[in-house]
Amino acid sequence: MHLCIAFLLCAVVYGISRISEPDLRAVNFADKIEGQKLNGSLIREIEVDSESSCQLECVDEEQCQSYNFGTMKGDSEKFKCQLSDSDRFVGSTNFNEDKDFIYSGVMREKCTTSITGTVRYNPSRKASERCNGKVWLSMLIGVVATEPGRHCLDILKAGQRRGNGLYWIDPNGGSTNDSFQAFCDMETEGGGWTLIATRVSQSISFIKTAFSVSAAKTTDADTASHIHPDMRDWEEVMFRFSDVNTIRVVYNRKAGAPNKDKTDFEKFLMGTAYREIRSIHGFYKYSPADHNKRNPSTGFVTISGWHFFSDRGISENFGGTDRWIDMWDHTDGSNNYVTSDDSRALGLKCIAGYCYLNKPIWMMVR
């Protein structure tokens, strides 16, 4: 037995429908359980005048999986309606007795052989689930080509990170036929970084006009590429060595925007050919020389004489500080760097003043 409630609601007023028809919301509620209440996972508590009003609120709330309906002391005409994004099965340890409440949850479709292979989204678990003919099994985003995230940050926000490594992504969000694997840094500054390109040798200009799918997963060899054209909502780009994340330089897109020089540099990062020298605002860094603390501690730095050439690389002026990014196509005669393991790395393989001849440098985005 279950109670079926179908409400016709205006999509303009009530937002996105919980089923496929744009103007129809149909939600099945299981038999109510008197004297029980689900604690925790509360979306919100509201005052209503009937249980049907509480059910309406749950129907209209995209994340609602169950509700508690209870009396209010001193007012026989008003009731508490508590909406939850969990249910008594997921949150069984929080399902407790309370004589003043009634509990009911959204009916879950049973997994049977007739719907084997069906995929659904479970908002309480924030994960897709596939029916195997008997039970609903969680599907982790990014594990297989048919269940990709849009990018590494998307996977992180879905609560699906599993440490640094390869994940399946699909930046355009359409058919998964064009999904591909990308290396994700899920640790540095909270994680969510997608690999774009890698520089190992001293001569490669690794930010190019052609996008490379293989570059997204290649961590230890020269691969040139640019930010995927469908990742237009990116906010930061990071340059770091592959084996250590305590030496890194980050460019922030919003800092100082809007600004034409920043816009041109960002177009360069996304594949447009440039040969420019500009003053670019929006950088900060971390390094042992900075005691592994953010430099500057607040705000951002403007790098004057910032070179970004599609055929030569990216670098501050060779007469500059030597403490930001120096990845040009020939060595630097000056030496204001913090350290180097080989003089041939100066000006070619340097991040935050640290130069290493053979360590891969990653360009990553989130």
Image: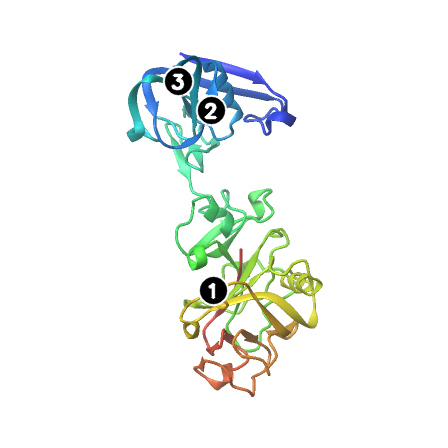
Query: How many numbered marks does the figure carry?
Result: 3
Quick check: can you spot residue 107? Answer: no
Mark 1 residue type: Thr
**Residue 243 x, y percent position in the rendering:** 41, 68
Work out how far the residue at label 1 is from the one at label 2, CA to CA, in angstroms.
Answer: 51 Å
Q: Secondary structure at mark 1?
A: loop
Mark 2 residue type: Ile
17 to the left or right of 38: right
- Badge 3 or badge 2: first in the primary sequence: 2
Work out how far the residue at label 1 is from the one at label 3, CA to CA, in angstroms.
Answer: 60 Å
Mark 1 Cα-neighbour bin, 10 Å: few <14, some 14–19, many ≥20: many
What residue sits right under mark 2 in the picture? 46
Residue at horizontal 39%, vertical 54%? 163
- Badge 1 or badge 2: first in the primary sequence: 2
What residue sits right under mark 3 in the picture? 72
> Would you identify the image quadrant in which residue 257 lies?
bottom right
Residue at horizontal 50%, vertical 20%? 27
What residue sits right under mark 1 in the picture? 219
**What scheme was used to colour the molecule?**
rainbow
Q: Secondary structure at mark 2?
A: strand
Q: Secondary structure at mark 3?
A: strand
**Residue 354 x, y percent position in the rendering:** 46, 77
Work out how far the residue at label 3 is from the one at label 2, CA to CA, in angstroms.
Answer: 11 Å
Mark 3 residue type: Met
> Would you identify the image quadrant in which residue 30 lies?
top left
**Residue 62 x, y percent position in the rendering:** 51, 29
- Badge 1 or badge 3: first in the primary sequence: 3
Q: Which marked residue is nearer to the observer: mark 1 or mark 2? A: 2
In the depicted structure, whether residue 323 falls above or below residue 2: below
